[in-house]
Image: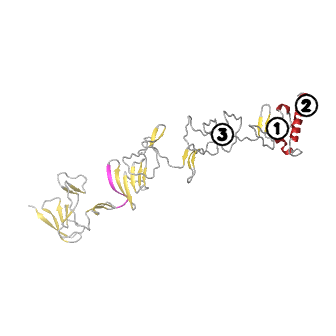
Amino acid sequence: MSKNNIDQALTYLASSIQSLVETADKPGINLATFHKDLPKRSLSGDHISGGKILGFASAGINDKATAEQIIVEDNNVYISKIRTGQVLGDLSVEKSVIAENINVLGTLKAQTIEVNELKADLRLERSSSLEFKKTDQEGIFGKGILWVGEGNAKQFVYNGNPDRLFSSESIYLGKDKHIGIDNIPVLSSTALGNTVVKSNLREVGRLKGLLVDGDVVLDQYVFYNSTASRLGVGIELPNAGFSVAEDGIEVMVGSREQTRGIIGTYASKQFDIVTDNISRISIGAGGDILLGNTTEQPIQVSVHGKVAIRVKNPDPEVDLHVGGAVRFHGHIHQYADASPTSGNFKPGDVVWNTNPQTHAGWICVRAGNPGEWKKFGKLE
């Protein structure tokens, strides 16, 4: 700036001050209000260089700062704080933006959004899957979806070791939908998949058509041994194809030596065949057989065929073949070539002669051992 310009500015300033003093109602200058009374446009900006301008104001600027707030450099403008009503046009921020609240009326676009809490009531539209990525600071364990605010938190999250998804609540599928593995249905509302071959079911409802391979245990009371192909009720290791055990007695139904079927008791136990809860045929522990019941009315036994007693090869020409003596109406009938020499007999017992030449046999006339015998049936 030339010396003439400075001189002119100082002269103009002095003239303005002199005019202000001369027109004042009272002598003296009030420095507190001097800048307000100074005529506008008394100095041009070209006449000012350096120093501070206090209380600076213009049509668009009102400076009320008491400390330095704006620093202007060649490639940078530093502003301590900004309060603005509206930012027009695009806004580019090189680093972080820290704000108490941000309201976006349009579209918010970001490569990464990292938040501690997300509150939203909106429709989420995505062109790619929702991802939970492992970082250097944390893994993906426990990540997923949480619903909080009513009771315990509801979770659908990843729960590793082993890899699995955990849901704290029940999951309902739509009608006619199913759960599948490897494109194979394994569970629907009405059926298990055909590939489900193992289970630890503890309780089932009504079954229709059940196929079981291997051992079966029902209530620790019914046992099927697939190795021996035997079924036991009340006994885990039955001694026949089918056994029922109760009170220490095992009743068997099965086969023996692959040649005959068997039914009866295992060990020395009596076996009864009953009707009306009454024993009708009793087989003793030693093998004795009783037809009927001595405490009941006599029963009728009908044999539609031939009967052999103590005969290994029955005679097909007779209906009754007895291999020894018989007692008929309380009296013994037996065959011999002489009268008895020992044994207890009573009158009426008969010994038929096996070599009848002169008489048919001998009859006991006095009881004893062997008693007194007389010939009878003289042959002519």
Magenta stretch secondary structure, dominant: strand
Q: CA distance from mark 3 to mark 2?
A: 71 Å
**Mark sitting earlier along the chain (3/2):** 2
Residue 161 visible, this angle: no
**Mark sitting earlier along the chain (1/2):** 2
Mark 2 falls on what kind of element?
Answer: helix
- Magenta residue check for 266: yes
Q: Amino acid at mark 1?
A: Pro
Q: Is residue 189 left or right of residue 377?
A: right
In front: 85, or 173? Answer: 85
Q: Which residues are magenta?
A: 260-269
Residue bearing mark 3: 135
Residue bearing mark 2: 7
Would you place residue 300 above or below residue 33 in this image?
A: below
Decide: few, some or many residues near mark 3? Use Cα within 10 Å; few <14, some 14-19, many ≥20.
few
Mark 3 falls on what kind of element?
Answer: loop
- Numbered mark located on residue 39 in the image: 1
Mark 1 falls on what kind of element?
Answer: loop
Residue 246 visible, this angle: yes
Q: Amino acid at mark 3?
A: Thr
- Magenta residue check for 237: no
**Total marks in image:** 3
